[in-house]
Amino acid sequence: MSTIDPDLSKVSRLPLGAGDPDRHDSLEAALSDAREYINFYDWGKAIKSEYLGYGVEGIIYIFLFEISPDRPEVFQWIWVIVGDVPSAFIPGDESKTPYQALDEYIGAMEEWVEAARQGKSVAKLIPVNVDANPANAEMLAGRLKFLDEKILPLIES
């Protein structure tokens, strides 16, 4: 399977391990959430390396994980987005930078919002761990607008 390696000049490598006492608590909590999220899936044997792509305390963190894939169709690089938004992964096959990963995340979540607003099935869309109803769609739409207008422009593309 061909893959595009991420631009590691746009991320900061994080030490593997249980925790880093010098790291800020919110970053450590977000990294723990991202690890739990990625480990929920059965397509990776192990996390080989971890990187921080971007973070805004209390709002969003974008992590990049290099994994040992369990199956040939699984990508070696996986972006994980956590924070005050639905957690999600973005396969690293085309997103080389945190900017691209967040842009792809926003687009996928906007598809979910539109389907939820219209009462359509979200089964084949990015998984969101809330009911697909208009109220949840509007809440998420507001967060996505904030990410698109205020956060995305701050991230170096």
Image: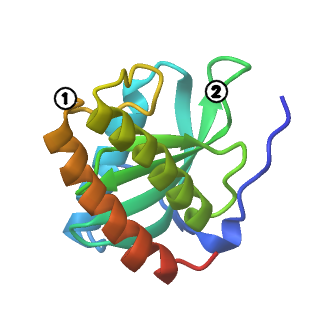
Quarter of the view holding residue 20: bottom left
Query: Which quadrant does the N terminus fall into?
Result: top right
Residue 13 vertical position relative to residue 78 in the rendered view, above or below = below
Q: Residues within 10 Å of mark 2 (few under 14, many from 20)?
A: some
- Please state which of residues 132 and 13 is positioned toward the viewer in this rendering: 132
- Please state which of residues 121 and 18 is positioned toward the viewer in this rendering: 121
Q: Answer left or right for 81 relative to 7.
A: left
Residue drawn at point x = 69 percent, y = 73 percent: 9
- Tell me whether circle 1 and circle 2 mark residues in contact (CB < 8 Å): no
Residue drawn at point x = 59 percent, y = 79 percent: 156
Residue 85 vertical position relative to residue 120 in the rendered view, above or below = below
What's the amino acid at mark 2?
Pro
What's the amino acid at mark 1?
Asp
- Residue tagged 1: 131
- Residue 49 shows which numbered tag? none
- The percent coordinates of residue 78 (x first, y second) are 57, 43
- The percent coordinates of residue 59 (x first, y second) are 26, 66
- Residue tagged 2: 69
Q: Residue furthest left?
A: 135
Residue drawn at point x = 30 percent, y = 48 percent: 32
Q: Answer left or right for 86 relative to 106.
A: left
Residue drawn at point x = 41 percent, y = 76 percent: 149
Q: Is residue 19 visible?
A: no
Query: Which quadrant does the C terminus fall into?
Result: bottom right
Q: How many marks?
A: 2
Q: Answer left or right for 52 relative to 112.
A: right
- Nearer to us of marks 1 and 2 is 1
